Image: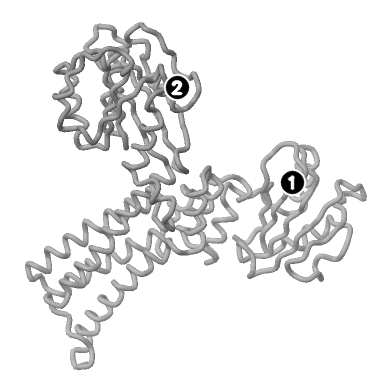
Amino acid sequence: MDDTICAIATASGVGAISIIRVSGSEAINIVNNIFKGKDLTTVDSHTINYGFIVDNNEKIDEVLISVMRAPKTFTKEDVVEINTHGGYAVTNKVLEILLHRGCRLAEPGEFTKRAFLNGRIDLIEAEAVMDMIDSKTDIQRKMAINQISGKTSNLINDLRDDMIQIISNINVNIDYPEYDDVDIITNDVLLPKITNLKNKINEILKESKNGKIIKEGIKTSIIGRPNVGKSSLLNALIEEDKAIVTDIAGTTRDIVEGNIILNGIPLNIIDTAGIRSTDNVIEAIGVEKSLKLIDESDLILFMLNNNDPLTDDIKELLNKVNDKKFIIIINKIDLDSNLDRTLLSNYQDNIIEISVKKNIGIDLLKDKIISLFNIEELNTKDPTYLSNVRSINILNSCLDKVNDIENAVNNNLPIDMIELDIKNIWEELGKINGTTYEEELLDEMFKRFCLGK
């Protein structure tokens, strides 16, 4: 990280202002050499300076330049931001001049990577920077700002602090047995500490399910036999004629997707092919995809036709969705009923009756989804959750290892052996916030960032 990097930090295109960011030990000197105005090497830190970018005595653009000296910057290096007029030509020209004068074009996410490597932020905070940029709802923004501000990192730091206390205590017992003012860690003393640790991890993982929903949305599949109104329901929910609707059974051969924001939570809706036995090869592939989506979805909207009897294959499908969050939707209630509702008596709390054609019950369905996922509560709580799949997977792995330690303690394994396992978990937890990391992980993670961030 000895070189000085630069990149365009604003979206490309025509606009009022574009910002070119420069970071590194030579940032101020390089920009000062192409700036006509105050001597940037002598101005106060965190000031904005008016002047012109010049190249070979030619004025390129009228600019405002922000000078920020290390270490009080995002990267903890000297940072200069050049505010040019927006547009392709002028922005790219200034960038080209900087590259000729000694800067290197930054890699995607390199400014944030430098902030992490220089100790300005941890990995949770770094990932939250991208989440903030990608946020489409206010609750996503709130969750990202809590992660950026370190609230979520504190959850992991507290776990590691608890573990280091245990590790330190055991080490003192082993290395300095003559110290009688330190608690002696026996299996009986250790067990409640491990149980407490397990409970804390379980609580974080439980709350993190909410974080995943806030960040990624609720993956929702509309499942049912052909011609029950699945495509019509998708169109009604997203208020757009996206899926083709006909009276011909099997019209939907592949998945059709749409998205809405429901009380601040994205609902990612998939209209699936009608599930039935078929000799049509293409339709059969669609049916197979529909069945697979049942396992992958967070929510199943299981549609039934009010004027069709409940067949054996539908009963089998109901059993398949029993371990998922699901809502049974009885459509076409404006028509005569041939559906024996007594066969659905075990599902009364999960039934919504609608008529997509008459626009009856759509709001009731939305209210049911809000209730099923406690969306109102999510909007009122302070969203301090882990939301990144990488972090959640590591924490799940740590939970498995804590369970192994609990079993080892109950089986009276020697404390010194257990201490090694506790230390291993402590190091694994460090991978969540980047206290310990692998270079390949950083490269893979930061290349997902936009250029200039």
Residue type at mark 1 is Ser
Q: In this view, does 343 lie to the left or right of 306?
A: left
* Residue 101 horizontal/vertical position (percent): 77, 53
**Picture disc at residue 235:** 2
Residue type at mark 2 is Asn
Nearer to me, 306 or 19? 306
Quadrant for the N terminus in the image: bottom right
* Residue 275 horizontal/vertical position (percent): 26, 17
Q: In this view, does 183 lie to the left or right of 238?
A: left
Which residue is rendered at x = 21% and y = 72% of the image?
193
**Picture disc at residue 164:** none
Mark 2 vs mark 1, CA separation in Å: 39 Å
Q: Nearer the viewer, mark 2 or mark 1?
A: 2
64 w.r.t. 119: above or below: above
420 w.r.t. 5: above or below: below
Which residue is tagged 1? 18
Mark 2 / mark 1, whichever is N-terminal: 1
